[in-house]
Image: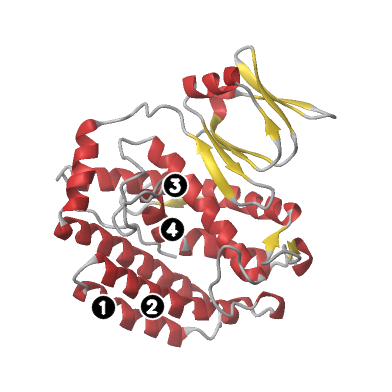
């Protein structure tokens, strides 16, 4: 399987014959072009049109993050799998409220069940979170009663609020208290981790959408408007608990991240470069981790699971098979 390249150093990306090279003041590294799926760029990197033309030719997406680790945008080559038929089907399922509601409710159901499974996992490891599991179970019953996506977003918000109460009991570290969910910028260390992890997942899902016939601008749970992309936000909701949150619990549980890995001199709290590198290493490892798929009967990676989720949505839109979200089993 092709891999993601993460660049944290400052330097120059350039085409070198039939491959690419990354050059810094001290070093030059050749990157085998056929092995690359996408490139996440955190450092100050120079590149030119010749390089971008080559990226388009090889269908490689570049994702850019600023000095503070915030996602700023992507170089998205011309959509090579564009399908007018699929775009029409996506629009139809968005514009018809009933069809949109069905997909959106499935996304929330999948997300809620994966939250429950995360809580169950830690409950079985003697964390006092069984009451939180019960709260989520009760709240999720409201999904089927929602009349529109606004109500659905309200129920989803309540479920997530209940779920976040488990974080302090699972982590048990005074330096990483949840308090409340804050964004742009995060107000404490744990929120900074959640925001950074979610951003990484949004960008990775965007890259996977590019490899399907779907248009990332048409989502169902998140309102399609003048924002860039919404479908990646939808699909990420299903996988956040079992990818991002589990990574956070692993990093903090094993003391792989400490308070010193954060910068709180600004208006909020942000991960320093070393902390981002550590998170990205764990993120990359998790995306390559394989699990046995109960329907396929073979091992698939988490990254592949995301692509399969998109294929399931395509089948639903074409009327071939009703969409059911991925739910983890430990």
Which is nearer the N-term, disc 1 or disc 4?
A: 1
Tag 1 residue: 142
Alpha carbon distance from label 1 to label 3: 28 Å
Which is nearer the N-term, disc 1 or disc 2?
A: 1
Alpha carbon distance from label 3 to label 4: 10 Å
User: How busy is the neighbourhood of tag 4: few (under 14 within 10 Å), some, or many (20 plus)?
Assistant: many
Image height of 63 relative to 83, above or below: below
Residues tagged 1 and 2 counted as in contact (Cβ below 8 A): yes
Q: Which mark is residue 205?
A: 3
Alpha carbon distance from label 4 to label 2: 18 Å
Q: Which mark is residue 239?
A: 4
**Considering the numbered disc 3 on the image, is that residue within a helix, a strand or a loop?**
helix
**Considering the numbered disc 1 on the image, is that residue within a helix, a strand or a loop?**
loop
Residue at screen point 83% across, 29% down: 25
Marks 3, 2: nearer the viewer = 2
Which is nearer the N-term, disc 4 or disc 2?
A: 2
């Amino acid at each position: 399987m092709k891999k993601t390249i993460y660049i944290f150093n400052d330097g120059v990306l350039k085409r070198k014959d039939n491959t690419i090279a990354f050059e810094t003041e001290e070093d030059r590294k050749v990157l085998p072009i056929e092995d690359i799926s996408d490139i996440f760029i955190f450092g100050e990197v120079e590149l030119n049109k010749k390089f971008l033309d080559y990226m388009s030719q090889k269908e490689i997406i570049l994702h850019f993050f600023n000095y503070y680790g915030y996602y700023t945008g992507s170089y998205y080559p011309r959509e090579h799998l564009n399908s007018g038929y699929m775009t029409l089907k996506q629009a139809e399922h968005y514009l018809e409220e009933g069809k949109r509601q069905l997909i959106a409710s499935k996304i929330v159901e999948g997300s809620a069940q994966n939250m429950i499974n995360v809580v169950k996992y830690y409950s079985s490891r003697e964390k006092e979170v069984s009451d939180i599991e019960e709260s989520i179970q009760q709240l999720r019953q409201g999904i089927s009663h929602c009349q529109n996506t606004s109500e659905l977003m309200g129920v989803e918000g309540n479920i997530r609020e209940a779920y976040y109460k488990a974080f302090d009991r699972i982590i048990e570290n005074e330096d990483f208290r949840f308090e409340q969910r804050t964004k742009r910028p995060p107000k404490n260390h744990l929120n900074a981790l959640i925001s950074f992890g979610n951003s990484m997942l949004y960008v990775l899902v965007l890259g996977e959408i590019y490899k399907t016939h779907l248009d990332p601008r048409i989502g169902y749970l998140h309102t399609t408007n003048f924002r860039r992309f919404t479908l990646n936000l939808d699909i990420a909701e299903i996988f956040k608990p079992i990818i991002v949150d589990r990574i956070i619990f692993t990093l903090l549980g094993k003391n792989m991240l400490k308070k010193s890995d954060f910068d709180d001199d600004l208006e909020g709290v942000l991960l320093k470069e070393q902390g981002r590198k550590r998170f990205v290493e764990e993120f990359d490892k998790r995306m390559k981790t394989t699990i046995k798929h109960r329907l396929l009967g073979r091992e698939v990676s988490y990254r592949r699971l995301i692509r399969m989720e998109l294929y399931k949505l395509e089948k639903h839109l074409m009327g071939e098979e009703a969409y059911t979200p991925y739910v983890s089993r430990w």
